[in-house]
Image (tube, rainbow, N blue to C red):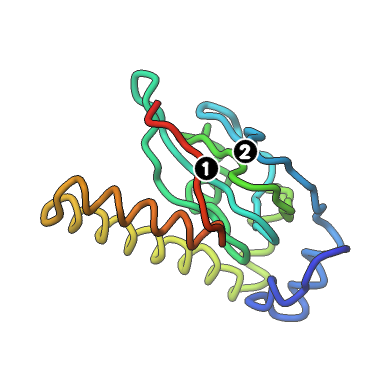
């Protein structure tokens, strides 16, 4: 597999071997939609390279929930796959990405056989919950101009870029 294996350093060797043996790695181009709301989840993604945006839609408006960076996964996808429920979110590729795709049929057994695999879910849940609290705090305290500035500054850091091309629609 053609990626930096240290991206998966949170997996202990026996589980890492299983993941590498039974999963696939796929390249996605910027703009590709990789998950839609109401779609059943067949694979658990772990971003190896690039950036994925997870969002909801309300009356044709997007609400950014979070970005998935290298070494991260999607807590919403993890939950939907374990409960075999349709996704409640959309996910699209923000920049060309390489993503590890773990078949969800393997998750229940791996969670039992490799208890440390649960840490991935708990760490992602904690990360997203912390981000949510931070966002709520900014909504309560900061003016719109400061929130917009912080969002754009954060986006520059995430993409490791000097400029951003986006619109308000």
Task: Point out the image quarter for the C terminus.
Answer: top left
* Residue 111 located left or right of residue 131: right
What crowding class fits label 1: few (fewer than 14 Cα within 10 Å), some (14-19), or many (20 or more)?
many
Residue underneath mark 2: 41
* Residue 132 located left or right of residue 101: left
Q: Is residue 105 above or below residue 110?
A: above
Query: x and y percent of residue 77 in the render?
Result: 54, 46
Residue at image location 39% in from the left, 20% down from the top:
60
Disc assigned to residue 80: 1
What crowding class fits label 2: few (fewer than 14 Cα within 10 Å), some (14-19), or many (20 or more)?
many
Q: Earlier in the sequence, mark 1 or mark 2?
A: 2
Q: Is residue 115 above or below residue 108?
A: below
**Residue in the foreground of this view, choosing between 23 and 53:** 53
* Residue 27 located left or right of residue 89: right
Disc assigned to residue 162: none
Q: Secondary structure at mark 1?
A: helix
Tell me whether circle 1 and circle 2 mark residues in contact (CB < 8 Å).
yes
Query: x and y percent of residue 76 in the render?
Result: 48, 47
* Residue 139 located left or right of residue 154: left
**Residue in the foreground of this view, choosing between 4 and 36:** 4
Task: Point out the image quarter for the N terminus.
Answer: bottom right
Residue at image location 34% in from the left, 60% down from the top:
131
Question: Between marks 1 and 2, how big is the CA–CA gap?
Answer: 7 Å
Q: Is residue 158 above or below residue 40?
A: below
């Amino acid at each position: 597999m053609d990626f930096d294996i240290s991206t998966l350093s949170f997996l202990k060797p026996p589980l890492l071997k299983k993941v590498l043996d039974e999963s696939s790695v796929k390249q996605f181009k910027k703009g590709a939609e990789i998950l839609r709301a109401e779609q059943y989840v067949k694979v658990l993604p772990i971003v190896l390279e690039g950036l994925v945006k997870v969002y909801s839609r309300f009356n044709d408006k997007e609400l950014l929930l979070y970005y998935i960076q290298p070494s991260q996964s999607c807590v919403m996808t993890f939950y939907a796959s374990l409960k075999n429920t349709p996704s409640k979110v959309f996910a699209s590729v923000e920049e060309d990405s390489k993503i590890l795709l773990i078949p969800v049929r393997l998750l229940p057994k791996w969670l039992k056989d490799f208890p440390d695999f649960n840490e991935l879910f708990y760490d992602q849940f904690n990360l997203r919950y912390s981000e949510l609290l931070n966002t709520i705090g900014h909504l309560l305290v900061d003016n719109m101009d400061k929130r917009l500035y912080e969002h754009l500054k954060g986006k520059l850091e995430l993409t490791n870029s000097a400029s951003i091309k986006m619109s308000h629609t």
